[in-house]
Image (spheres, rainbow, N blue to C red):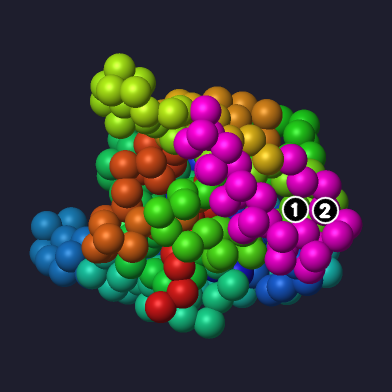
Amino acid sequence: MVVGTDGSPQADRAVVWAAAEAVRGHRPLHIVHVVEDQLLIGPDRIMPGIRQRMVDRSLQILMEAQALAVQADERLVVETRLVHDRTPRAGIGAHSSDAHEVVVGHRGIGGFAELLLGSTGLLLAGHLPLPVVIVRGEEDAPADTVVAGIDLTDPPETVLEYAFAAAAEREARLHVVHAWRPAPLAAAAGADLKAAQTMFSDHVAAALVLWRERHPQVKVTEDVVQGHPAETLVGCSAHADLVVVGYRTHAGPHLGSVSHGVIHHAHCPVAVVRPRS
């Protein structure tokens, strides 16, 4: 388990969340802080000693993150790593090849969603072959619910595999959601929307058979609804501990609009899971 930190409150929340996940899964936790190379080139000529102060502050960030993490369980194995790389995405990505998943906060220092760890989470989710969790929302009481959003145009196996495992580890129920929208003017053209609803429901039920058998202890509910997928999942996230979404294979290195929308607006952490190659 790898978690990136920049010392911001959102990153601290990600560290706490990742530590709890590591304890649940009996995994070690690796905390990574990246100092961008460009920030270390040249500053000493302008302000002597600033380079060392930046490194000292980075080490302090890692020490504080480690202290936060061990509060989850003093037996948790925690390793910290200060990385010099061209970007946070490159630094975290380079040190996560053997990780179970990567965790980051939804915003970084400065509070701008598209800067630092905020954009790092989006970039990591678009490039890494392993699950990436963007920690959003407040630290509320557990809802004991994991939500999985599945898109029937892409194979849902990896989303369901991750979601069932997450629910099993938490002893939580799993709510599987498929939201679909009729084509414009479909009803006016005489399309049988009721038949389409039945077809989608049958597809979702069929996709769940194997995973229900593998995780009989997980209580599963399923919903097939007409609605905007991102809006539907964001609504579900208000009563969930985790939302799991997939990665559109035809979107290239960019997230699809649904995953992007959920990451930006969900009320709880969001896991983005890529299909297997």
Q: Mark 2 highlights which residue?
A: 218
Report the amino acid beneath label 2. Answer: Val
Q: Position of residue 147 (x, y in %)?
A: 63, 42
Q: What's the residue at 23%, 69% (across, down)?
A: 86
Q: Nearer the viewer, mark 2 or mark 1?
A: 2
Q: Quadrant of the N terminus?
A: bottom right
Name which of mark 2 and mark 1 comes first in the sequence: 1
Tell me the tag on residue 167.
1
Label 2, label 1: how far apart the Cα atoms are: 7 Å
Q: What's the residue at 16%, 69% (across, down)?
A: 41
Q: What's drawn in magenta, residue-wise?
A: 194-221
The reply to whether residue 204 is in sight is yes
Q: Would residue 166 appear left or right of 75 to someone viewing this image?
A: left
Identify which residue, 270 or 157, lies in the foreground. Answer: 157
Identify which residue, 183 or 247, lies in the foreground. Answer: 183
Magenta-drawn stretch contains 205: yes
- In the displayed structure, 201 sits above or below 248; it is above
Magenta-drawn stretch contains 187: no
- In the displayed structure, 177 sits above or below 150; it is above
Q: Quadrant of residue 265?
A: top left
The reply to whether residue 72 is in sight is no
Q: What's the residue at 82%, 53% (across, down)?
A: 218
Identify which residue, 7 or 267, lies in the foreground. Answer: 267
Q: Quadrant of the C terminus?
A: bottom left
Tell me the tag on residue 21.
none
Residues at discs 2 and 1 in contact (Cβ within 8 Å): yes
User: Under tag 2, what secondary structure?
Assistant: loop
